[in-house]
Image: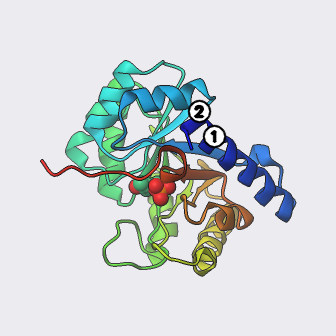
Amino acid sequence: MGIKENIEKVEQNIKAACAACGRESGEVKLIAVSKTKPVPMLEEAYANGCRDFGENKVQELVDKYEIMPKDIRWHMIGHLQRNKVKYIVDKVFLIHSVDSLRLAQEIEKEAAKKGVSVNVLVEVNVAGEESKFGATVQEAVSLVEQIVQLPHVRVKGLMTIAPYVEDSEENRRYFAKLKQIYVDIIHKNIDNVFMEELSMGMTGDYEVAITEGATYIRVGTGIFGEREYTVI
Ligand SMILES: *Cc1c(COP(=O)(O)O)cnc(C)c1O
């Protein structure tokens, strides 16, 4: 199957998952995760309606940003090093991977310099996997409370990367947990928090994530096919 058919298939699945749980399909936004994929493949996705693209490396995001049309919303979904923040603050639509106050402070500093506000999600390692980045469940609320003090950083919601599993139902509890933290934060009525987005679900488990409340799903393989990592 080509990219066009893959996108159609994912969109059908989004509709079906929404219908099954009584949500409007417009509530779920699809991010085409284009990391490692060449520009012509992104152009094909663009030609078939994709305007949200996800990348996990700063250099790759910046390179593609320069080449691709300017109405694309770029999502930084990978671990972000503080010394690279300056390259993307004025290019990204949303940073999904803020997991420490120090990183948020660096985003604040660079955003203030460029006179922009940066939308971020706080990444939570809900499953507690040692190999993954993200704030712990225990830290998440206080981290949000601290980040909202920064005038050029806007907390728009939460993100998680669930474990790789054979049976996507196994991840339902993690998506439900992220939703619960999100609701807890809303109930705290913290000034300057705009809890609107839950970024959860990838190729293997996005339908389950949708039924648990995802507003952004991040789909790479399901659109572009398997990734090949070349060792340099
Ligand atoms: C690579 C990646 C995805 C997409 O994964 P697929 O399984 O290919 O859909 C989603 N989210 C993050 C954070 C990623 O790094």
Q: Nearer the viewer, residue 24 or 113?
A: 24
Q: Which residue is mark 2?
A: 50
Relative horizontal placement of residue 1, taking residue 212 as reference (left or right): left
Q: How many marks?
A: 2
Quarter holding the N terminus? Answer: top right
Spatial CA span between label 2 and label 1: 13 Å
Q: Is residue 110 visible?
A: no
x 28%, y 32%: residue: 87
Tell me the quadrant of ligand 1: bottom left
Residue sitting at the far front: 1
Amino acid type at circle 1 is Glu
Residue 53 location (% of width, % of height): 49, 37
Instruction: Kindly identify which numbered label has been placed on residue 5.
Output: 1
Vertical order, 135 against 10 (above or below): below
- For label 2, the SS is loop
Vertical relation: 83 (above or below) 68: below
Taking depth in this image into account, of 33 and 193 the one nearest to the observer is 33
Q: Position of residue 106 (x, y in %)?
A: 29, 45
Left of 57 or right of it: where is 223?
A: right
Mark 2 lies within 8 Å of ligand 1 (Cβ measured): no
Instruction: Give the camera-side residue of 213 and 167.
Output: 167
Mark 1 residue crowding within 10 angstroms, few (<14) / some (14–19) / many (20+): few
Q: Position of residue 73 (x, y in %)?
A: 52, 31
Identify the secondary structure beneath mark 1.
Answer: helix
The amino acid sitting under disc 2 is Cys
Outermost residue toward the left in this view: 232
Is residue 172 depicted above or below 161 in this figure?
below
Relative vertical location of residue 16 with respect to residue 86 in this rendering, above or below: below
Could one spot residue 80 in this view of the protein?
Answer: yes
| Side of 70 where 176 appears, left or right | right
At a point 41% along the width and 68% down the height, the residue shown is 135
